[in-house]
């Protein structure tokens, strides 16, 4: 089973700046996946980006990119050009062996105008 | 693009009543997951279905049951409701054999037990 650590319970960023949300994981699996989800205050859970352990390149999706460092077991989410609408809770979520998602405490991001 | 549909979006029940939550997955998605997120808590996996069969079970109380129907929609039945059942209930769907096992979440059903 994977264990995820998001060390930043809260983060602040100025609008239009980039921000990195940290995620470290611990797994003995050779093949694994990591998702990032966003949950705004309205409550919906929005898929942002996925990184597979065998993906040769870091995942990117619009303003979202993953700084995936396999040797360091980190999969940090980088949001470029932050927008007010990026204010939300962000979850780094491992893909469990039984394929269900196990959520941790997340990081609350606040974008300041 | 079509998304996961959940109904109702809001539900208010009294203690000891029953509730049924419905989930309609994205077309061609044959796997459904249910999650419960209590106030100020992280989502917790409850149960999942693949091709109408239960595939995995998490922290689902015995008072709850669920099933997936032939059209792949799923229903979560909750009986003898307790105050602690007040939560946001998510359904997520996934396409079996998809490249990344990505689960797409519905908007959730907010259940309030009075």
Image (spheres, coloured by chain):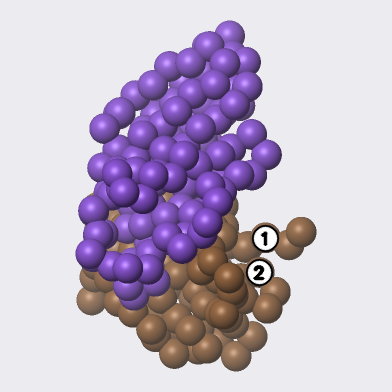
Chain colours: A purple, B brown
Q: Position of residue B52 (x, y in %)?
A: 50, 89
Residue B106 shows up from this direction: yes
Residue pictured at 37% horizontal, 68% vertical:
A31
- In the image, residue B83 sits, relative to residue B60, either above or below, namely above
Mark number, residue B26:
2
- In the image, residue B84 sits, relative to residue A6, either above or below, namely below
Q: Position of residue A85 (x, y in %)?
A: 61, 26
Determine the secondary structure under disc 1: loop
Mark number, residue A69:
none
Q: Chain of mark 1?
A: B
Measure the alpha-carbon separation of dots 2 and 1: 5 Å
How many discs appear? 2
Q: Chain of mark 2?
A: B
Q: Position of residue B71 (x, y in %)?
A: 64, 85
Query: Which quarter of the picture shows residue A60?
Result: top right
Which residue reaches farthest right?
B1
Q: Earlier in the sequence, mark 2 or mark 1?
A: 1
User: Answer yes or no: do the residues labelled 2 and 1 have beta carbons within 8 Å?
Assistant: yes
Position of A13 compared to A72: left or right?
right
Position of B104 compared to A92: left or right?
right
State the residue in front, B28 or A58. A58
Residue pictured at 50% horizontal, 74% vertical:
B32
Determine the secondary structure under disc 2: loop
**10 Å neighbourhood of mark 1: few (<14), some, or many (≥20)?**
some
State the residue in front, B14 or A64. A64
Q: Position of residue B13 (x, y in %)?
A: 39, 56
Mark number, residue B3:
1
**10 Å neighbourhood of mark 2: few (<14), some, or many (≥20)?**
many
Residue pictured at 70% horizontal, 74% vertical:
B27
């Amino acid at each position: 089973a994977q264990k995820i650590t998001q060390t930043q319970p809260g983060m602040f960023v100025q609008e239009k700046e980039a921000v990195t949300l940290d995620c470290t994981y611990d797994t003995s699996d050779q093949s694994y996946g990591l998702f990032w989800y966003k949950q705004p205050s309205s409550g919906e859970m929005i898929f942002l980006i996925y990184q597979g352990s065998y993906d040769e390149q870091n995942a990117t999706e619009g303003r979202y990119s993953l700084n995936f460092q396999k040797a360091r077991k980190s999969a940090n989410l980088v949001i470029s050009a932050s927008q007010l609408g990026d204010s939300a809770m962000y979850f780094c979520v491992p893909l469990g062996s039984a394929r269900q998602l196990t959520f941790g405490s997340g990081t609350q991001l606040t974008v300041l105008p | 693009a079509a998304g996961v549909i959940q109904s109702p979006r809001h539900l208010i029940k009294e203690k000891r009543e029953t509730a049924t939550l419905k989930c309609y997955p994205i077309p061609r998605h044959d796997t459904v997951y249910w999650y419960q997120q209590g106030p100020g808590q992280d989502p917790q996996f409850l149960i999942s279905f693949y091709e109408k069969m239960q595939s995995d079970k998490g922290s689902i109380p015995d008072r709850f049951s669920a099933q997936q129907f032939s059209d792949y929609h799923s229903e979560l039945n909750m009986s003898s409701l307790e105050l602690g059942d007040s939560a946001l209930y998510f359904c997520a769907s996934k396409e079996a054999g998809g490249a990344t096992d990505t689960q797409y979440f519905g908007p959730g059903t907010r259940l309030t037990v009075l």
